[in-house]
Image (tube, rainbow, N blue to C red):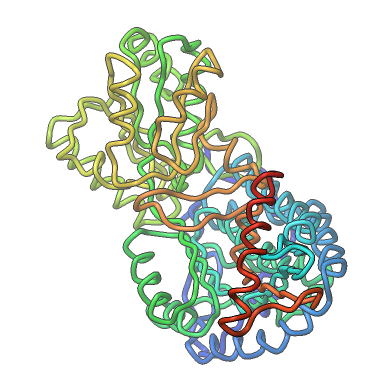
């Protein structure tokens, strides 16, 4: 399939977007597009001083932003929601040009970002409004809790889902009354800047959300040194370093890290439907998604027809990143991604794995295009089973029953996402309770949990700490403050004799509260 765009992109001035980047070094880096490998834009480079300046300005802006209140923030976030939908064609173009994904998979990002803006705009007051709590001595004391924004939040986002992952960390921080300084990946900076511009045009003060881009060793380190809370999405190795630095500074961090996500195919599936679900779960965005499936465990009773159906579905894939809906699968995003996929494939084949389908680089489609690849006879000594590939390869193994499938699914240092395909949703829910992962999807690969912005998303084990989305995602960005008032209805004790006289009364009160069921 040709990778050429079938229409001209929505007119956009890259210089207008790049003017919003906080970058004063005078240096640039050429960012290629996966469609052709040619230069897309010369991206200005930020430095540590840019980060410190952005954080300083954000601190001043955050005070007014927090005082503006929930109603004002709600209006801006809901206006931004509308602008994201109005500008979706531009955002889709930029997302595709930077990432190499299909238009349908780019739409997932824009739709998700709009949903995040809508949910946080409407729910922030309900979740963070605070209120009364039960006092230690009812009537005598009254206690309330309020939530204080943490201040300036640092957000470090990757290239693979630049729009949606940025929205899922930045928007709840804004809704909570925080300011944000975000480090965008070079390969996703234009998309992030276009996302931010929608919020600025909706009324967000510019200094409340700043974007920098540069070397992780300089810009990322400076950001982690300066902010009051850090959000990171990326590799487990980098996440460990960020967590260590945040720990030394006694600031909080939420980290979504690696995954080696498993899919279980039970013996009661419709094999054609299951093959369609599995292909999408593994190769949406060509596997370059933290919650993509990389391991499949298939019940022996359906292994032969399922394997045949999956091979047929992936045997002649429509690959491309044209600015239309012709492609079903995108391309790898960078030369480094292609190199990693090839290294994992070569290692597996050298150790005895077999290619069920795919396995070929497709430079006729794009410089980093690669066929969706499924391997069989994969063993634990192969990198493709022990390491996160984050690319166009998944493995398939046959199991004798669901117990074996669950044990193998849990046999990983990661625990981010998992999937169960079954003809019985009740059975799928029961099996989901046995799987060690932060999210489990029944009869879907990842979109059910990933798109449920009212529910928390995050990992277990080495897949990270903290949660984004839902109440939990908002609560990351605030500190609870308890305010208690003595109403002086009775004198509270201060001396030993006073404790002696009042102790019996307080014991009777405790017994009465226990009897009426009060906590």
Above or below, 30 against 382 in this view is below
> Which residue is at 50% across, 21% downward?
428
Above or below, 30 against 513 in this view is below
Residue 471 picture quarter: bottom right
Total labels: the figure holds: 0
> Which residue is at 77% across, 69% downward?
140
Q: Is residue 493 left or right of residue 273?
A: right
Q: Nearer the viewer, residue 394 or 156?
A: 156
Q: Nearer the viewer, residue 508 or 420?
A: 508
> Which residue is at 55% across, 58% downward?
98
x, y (%) of residue 380? 18, 37
Q: Nearer the viewer, residue 288 or 480?
A: 480
Residue 443 picture quarter: top right
> Which residue is at 39% across, 71% downward?
242
Q: Is residue 495 left or right of residue 361?
A: right
x, y (%) of residue 302? 37, 9
Q: Is residue 305 visible?
A: yes
Q: Is residue 191 visible?
A: no
Above or below, 463 against 347 in this view is below
x, y (%) of residue 353? 19, 30
x, y (%) of residue 37? 45, 57
Q: Is residue 121 left or right of residue 390?
A: right
């Amino acid at each position: 399939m040709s990778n050429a765009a079938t229409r001209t992109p929505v007119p956009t001035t890259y210089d207008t977007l790049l003017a919003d980047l906080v970058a004063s070094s005078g240096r640039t880096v050429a960012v290629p597009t996966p469609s052709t490998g040619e230069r897309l834009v010369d991206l200005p480079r930020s430095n540590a001083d840019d980060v410190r300046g952005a954080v300083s300005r954000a601190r001043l802006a955050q005070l007014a932003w927090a005082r503006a209140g929930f109603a004002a923030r709600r209006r801006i976030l809901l206006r931004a929601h509308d602008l994201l939908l109005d500008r979706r064609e531009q955002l889709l173009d930029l997302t595709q040009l930077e990432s190499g994904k299909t238009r349908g998979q780019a739409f997932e990002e824009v739709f998700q970002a709009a949903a995040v803006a809508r949910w946080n705009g409407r729910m922030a007051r309900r979740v963070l409004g605070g209120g009364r709590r039960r006092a230690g001595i009812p009537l005598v004391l009254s206690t309330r809790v309020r939530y204080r924004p943490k201040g300036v939040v640092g957000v470090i986002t990757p290239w693979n889902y630049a729009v949606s992952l940025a929205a899922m960390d930045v928007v709840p921080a804004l809704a909570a009354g925080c300011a944000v300084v975000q480090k965008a990946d070079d390969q996703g900076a234009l998309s992030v800047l276009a996302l931010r511009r929608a919020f600025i045009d909706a009324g967000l003060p510019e200094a409340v959300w700043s974007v920098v881009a540069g070397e992780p060793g300089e810009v990322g380190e400076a950001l982690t040194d300066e902010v009051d809370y850090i959000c990171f999405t990326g590799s487990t190795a980098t996440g460990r370093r960020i967590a260590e630095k945040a720990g030394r500074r006694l600031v909080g961090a939420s980290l979504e890290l690696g995954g080696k996500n498993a899919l279980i195919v039970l013996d009661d599936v419709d094999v054609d439907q299951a093959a369609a679900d599995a292909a999408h779960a593994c190769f949406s965005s060509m596997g370059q998604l933290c919650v993509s499936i990389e391991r499949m465990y298939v019940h022996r009773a359906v292994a032969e027809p399922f394997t045949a159906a999956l091979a047929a579905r992936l045997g002649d894939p429509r690959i491309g990143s044209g600015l239309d809906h012709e492609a079903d699968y995108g391309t790898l995003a960078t030369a480094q991604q292609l190199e990693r996929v090839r290294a994992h494939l070569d290692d597996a084949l050298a150790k005895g794995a077999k290619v069920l389908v795919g396995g070929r680089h497709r430079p006729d489609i794009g410089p980093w295009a690669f066929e969706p690849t499924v391997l069989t006879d994969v063993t634990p000594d192969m990198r493709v089973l022990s390491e996160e590939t984050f690319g166009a390869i998944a493995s398939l193994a046959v199991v004798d029953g669901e117990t074996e499938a669950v044990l193998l699914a849990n046999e990983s240092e990661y625990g981010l996402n998992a999937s169960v395909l079954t003809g019985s949703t009740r059975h799928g829910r029961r099996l989901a309770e046995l799987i060690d992962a932060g999210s489990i999807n029944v009869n879907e690969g990842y979109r059910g949990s990933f798109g449920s912005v009212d529910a928390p998303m995050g990992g277990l084990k080495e897949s990270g700490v903290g949660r984004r989305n839902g109440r939990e995602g908002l609560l990351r960005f605030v500190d609870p403050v308890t305010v208690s008032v003595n109403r002086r209805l009775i004198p509270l004790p201060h001396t030993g004799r006073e404790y002696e006289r009042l102790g019996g009364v307080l014991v009777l009160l405790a017994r009465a509260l226990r009897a009426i069921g009060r906590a």
